[in-house]
Image: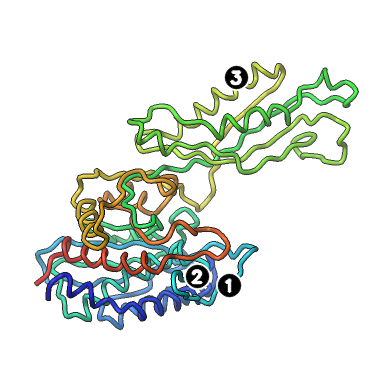
Amino acid sequence: MNVDQLLDRVDESAALEFLARMVQHKSYPETDDERVLAQYMVEQMRSLGLEAALTPVNETRVNAIGTWKGTGGGKSLLFNGHLDTNPVSEGWTVDPWAGTVDDKFIYGIGVSNMKAGDAAYFCAVKTLIDAGVRVKGDVVLTFVVGELQGGVGTLAAIQQGVRADYFINSEPTDLSAVTMHAASLSYTIELTGVTRHLSKREEAVDAIAAACALIPRINAMTFSNAKSEEHRSINRGHVGIVNGALGRDLHGWRPPQVSDFVRLRGVCRYAPGQTEADALGDLRRLLDTLEQEHHGLKATVFAEKHTGRPTMPPFEVDKNSRIVKVVNAAFRKVRGTEQPTGAIKPAGFFGTDAGHLYAAAGMEGVVCGPGGRYNTMPDERVDIADYLDMIRIYMIAILEICGTE
């Protein structure tokens, strides 16, 4: 059976039904339903003949890990995706838990981020097994939890020895091959001014006015020591929370006074080769300028650290890597065009578990998955054509990387 015949064997209706069933599991982080979905994935993998089991992440959470054992002599390929989803927001016009399918899209919370990617690599393996294909190298399927909490599930799998020669992380990239994404730094800035009654405002140092000057500068910044313009292209500063009032306790009952304290919280994205120290140093230089402009202002910045929640590291792979070339060729075969490849935005600003597979496990891989355009928004959805083509691209990648009997 040739490749074209194998690709024609994708059961499109069954693939959509499987993804819809995944959406129907309400797998919010650290809930019983998250564990139920992980168990469901183990059962589905075992039904294909894979070696599969639940593996511990902490006292209450589990990953679903399965292996399609090869006959020997081929390279191994690991697929990685998370089962936990963001919460449902306001504004939905369809049932977020139904897995509704129309003539163009499949809808549901988490369908883009990232159950369509999870289902695509499961269906790729199922299609090949049903066709009687025997691979030489192992195919490892990791359905992890805790990506939304910094990647705790993938880190647990790595610590338990889960490895392969190459990986594909299936985060939503609209089928682009993302070869680089940023690291994430969470920070807090505190601005301390001098209060006065509004009648003597000229004598005050207004912390809110200083913050208003600072925020657009942070939102426009890039960071020191970028290795190339492509690396600099995934630099971004952002302020997400602003609180200002009187004193560190932010008393808000006396609006006639000039506010003397503001706390800003935000995130920075910086590229491989840049460091947290680079980003913090650049923020500090902005604050030095702000202090000069607002005489008497005192400004501090520090990185936020969350106990038990790791930081997503950056990710990078050479565009000439075998796994990138294989995925590029698979895309060309399926779509008939060249695959967008590189630090593709917006995915280049993501934090993903690819960073852990790259930094903690020393693995070579690429980020490529269905979904993205309608991610983290009401009526989250994935183009059906993208989902089905992703299955076919993954099938080709398995055949090329792992080899067949």
Number of other residues with Cα within 10 Å of mark 2, as a class: few under 14, some 14 to 19, many 20 or more: many
Q: Secondary structure at mark 1?
A: loop
Residue visible at 23% across and 54% down in the picture: 328
Q: Which residue is mark 2?
A: 107
Q: Is residue 167 left or right of residue 148?
A: left
Where is residue 372? Give x, y as percent. 44, 57
Q: Quadrant of residue 333?
A: bottom left
Give whichever of discs 3 and 2 has the lower sequence position. 2
Q: In front: mark 1 or mark 3?
A: 1
Q: Which residue is mark 1?
A: 94
Number of other residues with Cα within 10 Å of mark 1, as a class: few under 14, some 14 to 19, many 20 or more: some
Which amino acid, by three-letter code, is at mark 2? Tyr
Q: In front: mark 3 or mark 2?
A: 2
Do the residues bearing badges 1 and 2 touch, measured as CB atoms within 8 Å? Answer: yes
Q: Which residue is mark 3?
A: 289
Q: CA distance from mark 1 to mark 2?
A: 8 Å
Q: How is the structure coloured here?
A: rainbow
Q: CA distance from mark 3 to mark 2?
A: 48 Å
Q: Is residue 28 left or right of residue 341?
A: right
Q: Secondary structure at mark 2?
A: strand
Which amino acid, by three-letter code, is at mark 1? Val
Residue visible at 22% across and 53% down in the picture: 323
Do the residues bearing badges 3 and 2 touch, measured as CB atoms within 8 Å? Answer: no
